[in-house]
Structures are given as C-alpha cells and as structure tokens.
C-alpha cells in the first residue's frame, strides 16, 4: 500500500522581500517582453545556451579533467548549486528562477584547471591588472558571449548582473574604491549602477550559500574517492565526524561508497536546515519589506549560524591540508600552471599564432589590451583543449 505523501511546508505566496519579476529593473538594452517566460526565466535560458556554460563540462575544480570522469566538473557543480539554490528559494518564498539562474552562471568565468588555473592567470596578468574569476563571469555575460545582433553579451537583467557581481558580498565596503576592483569589473561601463556598496538581492544570496554547501560537501566525496583521505581521517571534525559515525552505526555493513553518499546527503540537509533556521531568525529580527530592504541591511539576510560557520571553517582547514595541498593535487597544479604560463607567454610574444578571431584584435593594440585578449582566450578554454593545444604548440612530435 502506498504511504501517505507528506507535503513540505512551503509559503503560500511569495515572500514580501522576494525579488519580483514584474518590477524588474530591466535590461540595459531594451527588448520586447516574452509572452511565455518571465525576465528571469529568459536569463536562465540564455545562460544555458551559451558556449561558456557548455564548456564548464570539461573544466575542473580540484582535479584535472584527464584524471578521470568520476570527479566533479564546473558544470556538474553548477547544476548542484542551482538545485540547492532553487530549493532554498522555494522554501523561503523567493523567485526560484532567478536563484537557479544565479547558480547556473556563477562559475562561467572560471579558467581551465580549477584554482590552479585562476592562480596562474592572475600571475600572468600581474602587470596587466590581474585576473579574477568573478569579474571574468561578468565579462563573459556582458562582452564575450556575442550571440545577438543588437548588443554585446547576453543583456541579462539588472538583478542578474547585480547578483553575479556581488557573489561574495558588497564590492565597496568603505575600505576600497572602484579603482581597487579587478579590471574585468571596471571595464563594465554600467558597474556603478549595480549599487556596489550594498548586499545582493535575496536570491543571489541564496545562490552564493548554495555554492558553499555544494563544494564543501562534494569535496568530501571527491577527496575520499581519489584516496586523498579516509572516513577515519575525518573522525575528529565537528559535525562531519558525528554524521559519518551515525551512518556507520545505522548501516554497519554498508560499503564505503554508499556510506559516503548517505553521509554527504545528510550533511547537505543539515547545511540547508541551518541556513533556513538562521535566515528565518534574521527575517524576524530585521523585518525586510522588500528586496531593496534586503540589499540595504547591515548584514546578509541569507546566512549560516555561527555554530555552522565554525564547523565549516574546520572542514575547510582540513580540506586545505589534506586535499588542496596533497602532493598528487600539487603535481596536477604544477603541470596546469606551466601549461597556462607557457601559452600566455607564447601568445603575448607571437599574437599571430592566435586564431583569426582573436588575432585581429591582438595585433593592433598595446600590451595591456593584448594581455586581456590573451587572458580571455585562455580563460575560455577547457582543461582538455588547453592540454592538447599546448602539446601541439610545444611538442615537436605533433609536427611529425
């Protein structure tokens, strides 16, 4: 006999502080409204159809793509973030489509080879205003993805651009100015209209914390699968050790892989429950009456509790030592950094070796602009393409 379905507690209508698509601030280039989709649904769909989004399937987070297809890529991570963000938004009465779109788009500016690739591109660009993946995401959606006849980029809504720019919180905090921001932010002519001194809207905040939930917990899965650490190594970690012990006690004969799956599933649930509880506490305290009120708050509305933040810091410290600094990962990082450094140096010295689309611009500008063009070209590559291109350009065997 089928069991009675328990309906989750969801708000009957949108929260008063949700972002309302009906009153969106619109797009910087006016377009006719869609008869079948809200502005935020169109944003989501435009992101999904981009080349940059498709290439995330072969861009890695920690491991390089050729190490195996079991590990998460930027694409699978982005899908996981979007799913968590949408669930949180639904529970809090926010705009689900906007939260989902934020989750899908937040990593579009990441270069190949994960954190190693970002570090190396920033080093290559040290004399040319640097590289920042969040700023590069803005550059991708406002300049590099040219798919429409009447404007550059995707012409996303104001709310979408604001959320992407403030993925890590307000950009201007009193200690820094516009001139201190990464170049890819400053190059966007409408940047100052995005209210940089305030927090992002609630949906963007939900997506940002969904990002934390996804990568913290799924790095546990990937790290164990790669043999970088074991379940027993995490025994003393607050929360994580307790969850694993509970699963092992309930299922003493369960194999390791399913033990990890079950523990990570419970950990994600715990993270989400904590976020919802802390956010509801802040709603009760600050009583925001609009999305504008959320942006103007002195603290973020969507947040984890102090206790979970402490547990999260302990997990990150563990992962940093046992995973991100593991010699196997360091070897991959070393290879990846050499590939990008050598490609960057080659294209700066010999821009005629760039594909025609990039070469036409790079040969006619000064070093500052040329470096940004080369950086854009490299940042858009997948792991596999960068590896193969480096082989073809630097290995004499490829010429035989």
Image: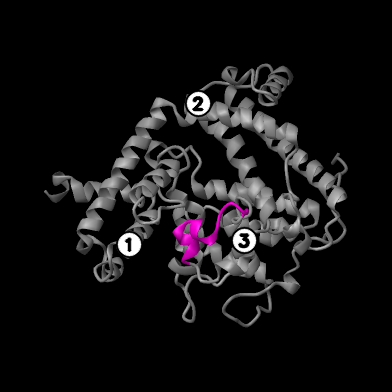
| Tag nearer the camera, 3 or 2 | 3
Using the rendered image of the protein, determine whether residue 294 is visible from the camera's viewpoint: yes
Q: Is 176 included in the stretch rendered in magenta?
A: yes
What separation in Å lies between label 1 and label 3 (alpha carbons)?
A: 26 Å
Determine whether, in the image, residue 189 is placed left or right of residue 371: right
Q: Which residue position holds label 1?
A: 368
Q: Position of residue 324 (x, y in %)?
A: 47, 32
Residue 200's image quarter?
A: bottom right
Within-10-Å neighbours for mark 1: few <14, some 14–19, many 20+: few
Rendered image: mark on residue 196: 3
Of 266 and 364, nearer the camera is: 364
Q: Residues within 10 Å of mark 3 (few under 14, many from 20)?
A: some
Queried whether the magenta region covers residue 205, the answer comes back as no
**Highlighted magenta segment, given as a residue range:** 173-187
Looking at this rendering, what residue extends furthest in the front direction?
A: 175
Disc 2 target residue? 321
Along the polypeptide, which appears first: circle 1 or circle 3?
3
Neighbourhood count class around disc 2 (C-alpha, 10 Å): few under 14, some 14–19, many 20 upward: few
Between marks 1 and 2 in the image, the one whose residue lies nearer the viewer: 1
Secondary structure under badge 1? Answer: helix
Q: Residue 55's quadrant in the figure?
A: bottom left
């Amino acid at each position: 006999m089928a069991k009675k379905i328990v309906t989750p507690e969801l708000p009957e209508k949108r929260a008063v502080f949700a972002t309302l698509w009906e009153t969106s601030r619109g797009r910087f280039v006016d377009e006719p409204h869609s008869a079948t989709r809200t502005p935020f649904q169109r944003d989501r769909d435009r992101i999904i159809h981009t080349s940059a989004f498709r290439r995330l399937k072969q861009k890695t987070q920690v491991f390089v793509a050729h190490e195996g297809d079991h590990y998460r890529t930027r694409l699978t991570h982005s899908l996981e973030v979007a799913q968590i963000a949408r669930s949180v938004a639904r529970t809090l009465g926010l705009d689900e489509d906007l939260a989902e779109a934020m989750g899908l788009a937040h990593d579009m500016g990441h270069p190949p080879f994960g954190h190693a690739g970002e570090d190396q591109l920033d080093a290559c660009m040290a004399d040319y205003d640097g590289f920042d993946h969040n700023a590069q995401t803005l550059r991708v959606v406002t300049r590099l993805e040219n798919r429409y006849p009447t404007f550059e980029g995707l012409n996303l809504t104001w709310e979408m651009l604001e959320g992407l720019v403030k993925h890590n919180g307000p950009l201007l905090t009193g200690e820094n100015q516009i001139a201190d921001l990464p170049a890819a932010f400053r190059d966007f002519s409408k940047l100052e209209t995005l209210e940089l001194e305030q927090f992002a809207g609630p949906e963007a905040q939900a997506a940002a914390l969904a990002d934390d939930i996804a990568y913290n917990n799924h790095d546990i899965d990937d790290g164990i699968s790669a043999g970088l650490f074991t379940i027993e190594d995490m025994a003393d970690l607050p929360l994580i050790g307790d969850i694993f012990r509970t699963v092992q006690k309930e299922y003493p004969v369960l194999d390791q892989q399913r033990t990890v799956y079950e523990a990570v599933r419970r950990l994600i649930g715990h993270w989400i429950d904590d976020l919802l509880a802390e956010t509801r506490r802040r709603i009760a305290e600050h009583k925001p009456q609009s999305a504008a009120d959320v942006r103007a708050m002195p603290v973020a509305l969507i947040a984890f509790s102090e206790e979970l933040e402490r547990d999260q810091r302990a997990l990150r410290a563990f992962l940093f030592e046992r995973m991100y600094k593991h010699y196997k990962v360091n070897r991959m990082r070393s290879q990846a950094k050499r590939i990008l450094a050598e490609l960057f140096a080659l294209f700066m010295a010999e821009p005629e070796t760039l594909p025609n689309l990039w070469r036409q611009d790079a040969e006619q500008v000064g070093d500052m602009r040329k470096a940004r063009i080369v950086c854009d070209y490299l940042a858009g590559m997948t792991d596999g393409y960068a590896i193969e291109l480096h082989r073809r350009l630097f290995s004499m065997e490829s010429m035989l």
